[in-house]
Image: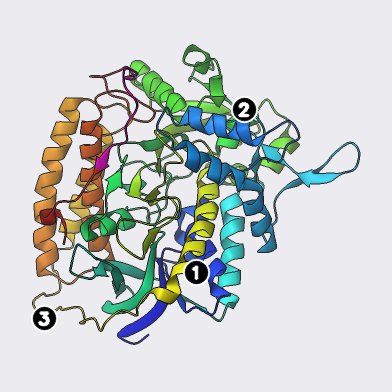
Amino acid sequence: MPNSQNYDVLIIGSGGAGLSLALKLADHSLRIAVLSKFALTMGSTFYAQGGISAVFGADDSIESHIEDTLDAGAGLCDSDIVRLTVTHGKSSIDWLRQQGVVFTEEQTASGEVKLHLNQEGGHSHRRIVHTADATGKAVSLSLIERAQEHANIDLFEHHNVVELITSSKDADKRILGAYVLDSKKQAVRTITARVVVLATGGASKAYLYSTNPHSSTGDGIALAWRAGCRVSNMEFMQFHPTCLYHPHAHSFLISEAVRGEGGKLILPDGSPFMQHFDPRGELAPRDIVARAIDHEMKKRGIDCVYLDISHKPEPFIREHFPTIYQQCLEFDIDITKQPIPVVPAAHYTCGGVVTDSYARTDIANLYAVGEVACTGLHGANRMASNSLLECLVFAERASEDILQKLPGILPPPEIPDWDESKVSDSDEEVVVSHNWDELRRFMWDYVGIVRTDKRLSRALSRVELLKKEIAEYYGNFRVTSDLLELRNLVIVAELIIRCAQLRKESRGLHYTLDYPETDNSRPAKNSVLTPQPTERR
C-alpha cells in the first residue's frame, strides 16, 4: 500500500455494519476500502451469540416488536426510527441468507421447515433468528468471504485510524479522509475518500469487566468528537447480566438465550431471586437483571451468582448452546449438570455519534453505522438482538444515501503527509498500560451499574488528569495502536461521565442513588454534548 491512496468510500470498521455497507455499495463500480483495526474476525459482531430480532412467527407482529422496543428504551426511543428498523427485519434476514448465512431451522409437526426462533429478555414473542449460539460468527464469516471475493473492495487488516481529515471551515466542513496507522509496518499513511463511514463499534472496554473484544475502545466516537460531531446518550452503557465468572475466562458471554430457554438465576444456596425484582423474572430487560445481580452480590458479599439450565435435557442443551457448552467444559463446568457462575459486565454502548435516519452525521459526507452511532433506536436501554438488526438496516439506509449523493461530491484535494518529524520512539510504554488499567478500574468503580453524583465527580477529576498525561505523551512520541486506543478511550470515558452528570434522574441503564426515580413530570430528553473548539483536534 503506497503512502497515499484515494477511494470513493472509506469504511472504518469490518464488523456487521461495515462489511454489509461495503457489499451493498461494491456492485456500483465504486472503489471501497475497509479498515480493520486487528484481524477481520476481531470485531464484536464475530462474538455475538444470541441472534437478530425480526418478526417471523405467526403469533408475532411488527407492532408488538415496536412496543417491546419502546418499552425497553424507557421513553427515549425515536418511535419513527424504531418503526423504520423493525419493518426492515425480514428483508435484512433475507439479504443475509443471500450472502450465504445459514440460520438454525426446525421442522414442524406438519413437516414444514422454518426458521427456529429464540426468545430473549424484553421480547414478548419468539423472534430471535439465530445460528445455534454463534450467530455473529456465522454472519461475520459469510460477509468476510463475500468481501474478499469482490474486486471493488480492498480489505486492510491491522490498520488503526489516527485522525479524521476534514476541510478547515466549519460553515461547509466536509470529510476528506483519514490518517491511518499500519500497525504491522508502524507507518502512518493517508487515505482520502469522497465519503467516510464510521463502523467502529462501541466503547465497553472503558470498563474493567466487559463482554466485548479488545477492539471496543470507542475509536469512532472519539474520532467524530474531535472532528466536531455531536455525541448523545453516552450515560446509557448496557451491562450484560451474565458474563462467565472464572479467573481464566476473559470476556466470555453467556447468551441471553440461555434465560430465554428456561435458565434460572440462583444464589450460591440454590435459591432463585429474580422474582423479587420483576414479575418477568429472568426475562426482564437487561438493565433490571444486571442491577438485581449487582444488588445481590453487594448485599451478600458474594463474588458471583449462578445461571442454571441443567434441568433441561442434555441433548437439548448441547444442541441449542454448543459454543457455551464447549467453552464452559474447558473450565471444568458441565452446564448439563451444574450451574454457570456469572457476573454482569459492560456489553453495549447505547449512545454514540448523533445520526439521522440515513446514518448521516453533523459533517458532510461522514456517516456512522452500527454501535458507534446514536440513531434513536435504543433509547435508554437496548433490547436484546436489536443491535445486529440496526447494523443491517442502517447499512442499507446509508448505501441508498451515498449512492444518490456520490456523483455530486468533489474528489478530495491533495492532503499533506502525516508529520512525525518532531516525535521519537517511546521508552516508557508502561505509561500507556498503567493509564489504561487506571481508567478502566475507576470507570468500573464510579461510573458502573449504580452511580452517585460524588462518584461521577471523582471519576471526572481523574479523567481530566489522565487526559493531560495522555496528551503530553501523544505529542512527544510516535503513535502506536495501544496509544491511539488509550487516547480515544479517555475521551469516551469523559463523555460517559458528562452525559451521566446531565441526567438528574434514573432511567433505563442509568441508575443513580441520588435520583433513584424516573422523572415523568416532563418529556424525556436525550443527553446531547457538542464539542467546543478547544475539544477539537
Q: Identify the residue at the far right of this view.
A: 110
x then y, percent, for residue 243: 46, 37
Residue 250, position as x, y percentages in the image: 42, 47
Disc 2, SS: loop
Tell me the residue that label 2 is attached to. 124
Residue 13 sits above or below residue 88 on the image:
below
Nearest to N terminus: mark 2 or mark 3: 2
Residue that numbered label 3 is attached to: 421
- Labels 1, 3: front one: 1
Front residue of 29/13: it is 29
Would residue 321 be counted in the magenta stretch? Answer: no
From mark 1 to mark 3, how far is it between C-alphas?
Answer: 39 Å
Q: Amino acid at mark 2?
A: Ser
Whether residue 72 is visible: yes
Q: Which residue is nearer to you in this view: 267 or 60?
A: 60
| Point 63% across, 36% down: residue | 62
Left or right? Give the position of 219 relative to 358.
left
CA distance separating discs 1 and 2: 37 Å
Q: Secondary structure at mark 3?
A: loop
Q: Amino acid at mark 3?
A: Ser
Whichever of labels 1 and 2 marks the residue nearer the N terminus, that label is: 2
User: Which amino acid lies under the numbered mark 1 shown in the image of this protein?
Assistant: Leu
